[in-house]
Image: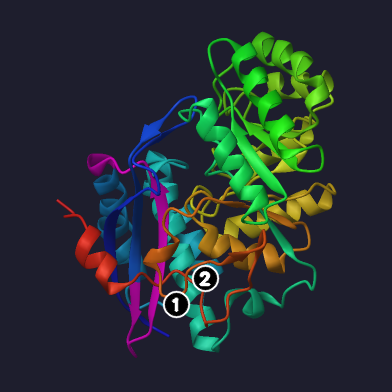
Amino acid sequence: MKIASVRPFILHLPLTSDSISDSTHSITHWGVVGTKIVTTDGLEGYGFTGTHAHLASDRLIASCIGECYAPLLLGEDASDHQRLWTRLARHPSLQWVGRAGITHLALAAIDIALWDLKAKRAGLPLWSYLGGARTDALEAYNTDIGWISFDLDTLLRGSAKAVEEDGFTRIKIKVGHDDPNVDVERLAAVRKRVGSRIRIAIDGNGKWDLPTCQRFCALARDLDIYWFEEPLWYDDVASHATLARNTSIPIALGEQLYTIDAFRSFVDAGAVAYVQPDVTRLGGITEYIQVADLALAHRLPVVPHAGEMSQVHVHLSYWHPTSTILEYIPWIKDHFEEPIRVEGGIYKRPERAGASTTVLAESFARYGKSLG
């Protein structure tokens, strides 16, 4: 399975709403920056990372794929994913300019494409290629109804619809107003609307400092919050550990962590209860598996960040024993040959060979961007 070409691409895909905001970001499109790897016998593998659709920075990722990594891959055996991952991740010149950020996002796209090729070559869905799926259901939690930019009426209508019409038993609400009392009031209203049996998680996207988080957690004590995601600045291990010791609300994090070493720091400090790796931030599936195994060794649940990569995370979550819950944000699913499916709040297992990352030709034609 020799690699004949490595071709980067950029897509800017519109959201399901005109625009959304959390406590730190506002966007109108999602960036899908990745690569198509073609073998000498014509097999195609697709992999990508996710961005906020900023064209200049997206071109940097695409350039890293096409100019830095592609020459190291041409003529290589695409099935040698571990050797190739190490060659790219530990390349002396490339690790000098970045062991996270642009170089790691580019590595993620390539690694996912290599795994897609391997599963396609075997004629199996990725979850099956990895060793088979659990028999229990993979529950979805709906985040797309809970943006901080939604006014209270919109938030309540969306939460009610997700629960009463769409069958979700889990939802996630964004928090992070300058006055945390506003968030407590919104959460109390949602709790009253959906009832006591629905599991509500919250996500601060790193906005607040430690005193604000402690004050908020005290105010929200009686709202039965399932977890508090990214309460503090993403790299602040010590403050997360302090918060975890001083609140009964479990801490979740991981979407902004780029390496297994970063995850190990939080795990070792007792700073995280729900581990949330993302194949598009980590170095792809290869490093994701390492992080999931780390969580398993510490008996911690893995709940992948799935904003832009539910396609791959469905496979990984059905396969790995630590994962029984997965985020649902349906922004990009309809741009793939095999879109993800959720029915009654449960993810359906993918059926086609590969990692479900093959992009539709019409999406390339309509939403593709110049590489510069």
Looking at the image, residue 224 sits to the left or right of residue 16; the answer is right
Q: Return the x and y of residue 248 as percentages of the image width and height.
A: 84, 25
Looking at the image, residue 163 lies above or below residue 180: below
Q: Which residue is mark 2?
A: 81
How many marks on residues? 2
Please name whichever residue, 152 or 207, is drawn nearer the observer in this view of the structure.
152
Q: Return the x and y of residue 103 as percentages of the image width and height.
A: 39, 47
Examine the image and state in which quarter residue 254 appears: top right
Dot 1 crowding, Cα within 10 Å, few <14, some 14–19, many 20+: many
Looking at the image, residue 316 sits to the left or right of residue 281; the answer is right
Kind of residue indicated by mark 2? His
Is residue 209 visible in the rendered image? The answer is no
Disc number at residue 78? Answer: 1
Examine the image and state in which quarter residue 56 appears: top left
Kind of residue indicated by mark 1? Ala
Looking at the image, residue 158 lies above or below residue 339: above
Disc number at residue 171? Answer: none
Proximity of marks 2 and 1: CB atoms separated by less than 8 Å: yes
Examine the image and state in which quarter residue 349 appears: bottom right
Looking at the image, residue 193 sits to the left or right of residue 362; the answer is right
Q: Residue at x 27, y 45 (%)?
A: 60
Is residue 74 visible in the rendered image? The answer is yes
Real-space Cα separation, disc 2 to disc 1, in angstroms: 6 Å
Q: Which residues are magenta?
A: 37-57
Q: Secondary structure at mark 2?
A: helix
Looking at the image, residue 20 lies above or below residue 206: below
Please name whichever residue, 197 or 47, is drawn nearer the observer in this view of the structure.
197
Please name whichever residue, 199 or 351, is drawn nearer the observer in this view of the structure.
199
Q: Quick check: is 118 in the magenta stretch?
A: no
Chosen colour scheme: rainbow
Looking at the image, residue 273 lies above or below residue 342: above
